[in-house]
Amino acid sequence: MNTGSIKNKKVTNYTYYKLSLINNSLGGGVVVGRKKIKEFVIKILCAKCSTPLYIYKKEGPGSLVKCYVEGILKDYTNGNLECPKCGQQFARLAKYHNRPAHKIIQGKVIVKGHCGK
């Protein structure tokens, strides 16, 4: 039995996944299974007074529904989920996939820097 040259499909898949994680840590994107999801850095503003609320790293295309706490790069609200200028509540605390998140209330925020395609 030669253990130096194992050609097992599971080992190959694991190696591919591990290499993908290493490559993406250098600035590529997020790996989910074998798919690579694009990331966008967006700016979230208050819809009422246009005050900046967050700078957030969004994963994948589509509209902004929730903000995972670990994706928030800069928080201008000090964590109270209200606009610091006008006091309007723009999100609620929630948990998705056992990860803490802020559920965005529709119409309360404006997203800049993401095309949504």
Image (cartoon, rainbow, N blue to C red):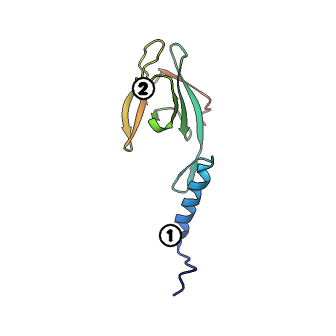
Would you call the spot at circle 2 few (<14 residues within 10 Å), some (14-19), or many (20 or more)? Answer: few
Foreground pick, 37 / 21: 21
Q: Could you tell me residue 87's position as x and y percent?
A: 43, 14
**Between marks 1 and 2, how big is the CA–CA gap?**
43 Å
Question: Who's the residue at 45% across and 35% down the image?
Answer: 69
Q: Could you tell me residue 2's position as x and y percent?
A: 54, 85
Foreground pick, 53 / 109: 53
Furthest residue toward bottom: 1
Would you call the spot at circle 1 few (<14 residues within 10 Å), some (14-19), or many (20 or more)? Answer: few
Q: Quadrant of the C terminus?
A: top right
* Residue tagged 2: 79
Amino acid at circle 2: Gly
Question: Who's the residue at 58% across and 31% down the image?
Answer: 42
Q: Could you tell me residue 40's position as x and y percent?
A: 59, 37
Left or right: 61 in relation to 100: right
Q: Could you tell me residue 59's position as x and y percent?
A: 54, 41
* Residue tagged 1: 10
